[in-house]
Image (cartoon, helix red, strand yellow):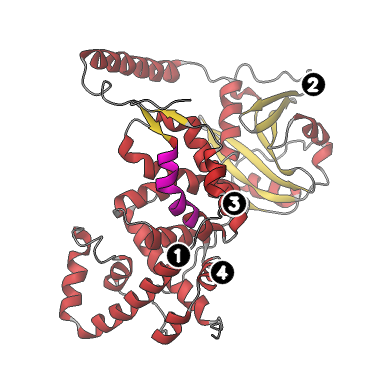
Amino acid sequence: MPLTGDQTNFEEIVDRYYRGLYQFALSLTGAAAEAGDLTQQTFYLWATKGHQLRDAGKIKSWLYTTLHREFLQSRRRQTRFPHVSTEEAELPPIEPAFVQQLDGATVLDCLQDVDELYRAPLALFYLDDRPYKDIAEVLGVPIGTVQSRIARGKAQLAARLQTREVPRE
Amino acid sequence: VSEVRELLAAYRPGIDDADPQFAGALAQLRADAELQRWFARHRQFDATIRDRLAAVAPPADLRDRLLAAPKVVRFPTGGWRQPAWLAAAAGLVLFGVLAAFWLQATRQPTWAGWRVEMAQFVAQEYPLDVHATTLADARAAFAQRGWPSDFAVPAGLQNVPLEGGCLLRWRDQPVTLLCYETPHDGEVWLFVVARGITPDAPREDLPPVVQRTGNITTAAWSDRHYSYLLATERPTPPIHRYF
């Protein structure tokens, strides 16, 4: 079907957002196949329901919110009893040399050990450059909650990474 | 951990510089050498994690798979913003919404409305209010709180593992929800409510009525005291196993 001036170009939207959405999905799931499926489902929903969005400036928020909602839906069973950690939000001391040697697979793997409650805010902290107002909208929680979850998630991630042996060159 | 450190942990240099909520924490950072050392370590950690995550490449065929979905989404631009007809349309919509609210507030509760709201409840994430693996424990917990507890559980659910339940309210009426985890059909839910909750609740002398609401299949029936709604995410046939 040819594109016209008053229609949003699906291909343009895919090209602009699919990489970031896939990275967000992979940060949430830790599994490439599942991340691909989530990304695909998100764009499918955009293709079928995106016309309901009245503000073109909200496309990115819509896509991230939808992907996060689809992820939560797929995890509904597991998150029925979310584990709310009470551990401190302090980043444990990590040697700079150790941090430098971390590879992507190790980071993604350890991210899966972070409480699900903190994982999405943490992933968006690292992958999204939008204001916190928008991130809070994606996650459906107040801005202050996003920030405290980031601090706690980061502390959990650092603690998990410290238990890993860094691959030797 | 201090509030300042918690805020700084969420601060993204170059992105949140103009965000006033970080102003106080950044002022303290400038005045505190120990905090600066902590923040420098933090930033190095963040930069590495950010680099590693941003370097992840999607599968080579993902873009093609995505583009195989419908190509075009109609998007309203330009004309919907200002014209006078839009104001008129908005007025009509507002009138419709207010009328709907008025009708909703004055209309009698219906069994269909109750059924849909219950189905919507289990279609989303929710916490369990009662943790119990035996029906006796669940009944005791419900009774203690004044919720329906002496109801009859259908034979098909007698040996299904119970996870617990929820204490719900619908139009000031207590609704008991039992949550089961079946071996083959995933979760199955049983709602129990006083029989008179709506005038059109299922009749006692009729067999269960099976219906589909969104992704949820329901079966509804009544006995002398209660009305029941059995729900599952599975399609219609398996629900018959449980009543």
From mark 3 to mark 1, how far is it between C-alphas? 26 Å
Q: Image point 51% across, 42% down: which residue?
A: A42
Instruction: Answer whether labels 4 and 1 touch (C-beta < 8 Å).
Output: no
Any mark on residue A75, and which?
A: 3
In percent of width and height, residue B192 lies at 67, 34
From mark 2 to mark 4, how far is it between C-alphas? 52 Å
From mark 1 to mark 2, how far is it between C-alphas? 59 Å
Which circle's residue, 1 or 2, is located before the other in the chain? 1
Q: Is residue B242 left or right of residue A39?
A: right
- Residue underneath mark 2: B207
Neighbor class of circle 1 (other Cα within 10 Å; few <14, some 14-19, many 20+) is few
Q: Image point 60% across, 53% down: which residue?
A: A34
Location of residue A167 (image quadrant): bottom right
The answer, for residue A130, to whether it is visible in the render is yes
- Above/below status of B117 relative to A117: above
Location of residue A153 (image quadrant): bottom left
Mark 2 or mark 4, whichever is nearer to me: 4
- Residue underneath mark 4: A109
Chain ID for label 1? Answer: B
The answer, for residue B126, to whether it is visible in the render is no
Mark 4 or mark 3, whichever is nearer to me: 4
Instruction: Give SS at disc 1.
Output: loop
The quadrant in which the C terminus of chain B is found is: top right
Location of residue B222 (image quadrant): top right
Mark 1 or mark 2, whichever is nearer to me: 1
Q: Amino acid at mark 4?
A: Asp
Chain ID for label 2? Answer: B
